[in-house]
Amino acid sequence: MLRFLLTFLSLAVLVAGEVAPAATPPAAQAVLERLAKAEAKIDFDAAKARSTERLKAIKELEKVQVSTTKSGDLDAAVAIKARIEVLRKLDEIAADELMGDAKPAAKDPAKLAVGSWSATKTNGVNAQIEMKDDKSAKAVWGPLVIAGTWLVEKDRILIRWGGDSAKWENLGVDGPDKLSGDSHDAGKDGIIMVRVKK
């Protein structure tokens, strides 16, 4: 019975996080280091493959943009150009991360959020979004201008449009120049925003 109580108390203390974990033996450490290297290589190879596909898509989109412009559909050509710019920016950010040159993300998402962003949604919507210090937001989508507000909640940036709680963007910080997340009209992982540098 005493052994049971001691075991129970030890487990309770361990669950509570009061006991420091034992040192990892060298053999186990070697396995973990090999795993870390393998995962880093997988991440690098995947990022490289994504970049290759992204650059291919950019070239194809440029051809479509030229033919769309020639056909006289200037609105569609401008939308394609916006998509190309977002893809280029994403590739630039990914290249910086691969080379270890990525800028550390701001610790305060509220400071990071302020500025102009190019937003692309998986449902085909492309907009320019501006977030200001006073927590106001504005989206320009073609001829439409939509006002909103933004706030930070649990390290995520939430935008609400037109005072309607059903119209929102829920964004995580992916770096100093990239936000991505969920959208009311494009669903989970439906929006990517890249900072527009002036």
Image (spheres, rainbow, N blue to C red):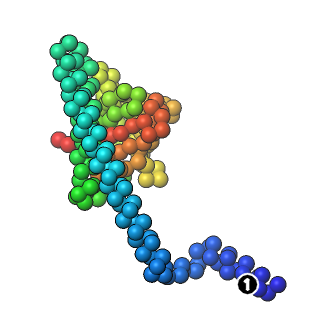
Q: Residue at x 40, y 71 (%)?
A: 33
- Where is 10 relative to 60, above or below? below
Q: Position of residue 163 (x, y in %)?
A: 46, 32
How many C-alpha atoms fall within 10 Å of the one at disc 1: few (<14), some, or many (≥20)? few
The percent position of residue 147, horizontal first and vertical second, equals 37, 31
Could you say whether the residue bearing mark 1 is in a helix, strand or loop? Answer: helix
Q: Residue at x 20, y 12 (%)?
A: 71
Q: Which residue is mark 1?
A: 6
Q: Is residue 104 above or below residue 20?
A: above
Q: Residue at x 34, y 33 (%)?
A: 120
The answer to which quarter of the image holds residue 98 is bottom left
**Would residue 163 be visible to someone looking at this image?**
no
Image quarter where the N terminus lies is bottom right
**Quarter location, residue 190:** top left
State the image quarter where residue 136 is shown.
top left
Q: Looking at the picture, how far across and down is residue 123, in whole percent? A: 41, 28
Asked whether 51 or 72 is in front, the reply is: 51
**Total number of numbered labels?**
1
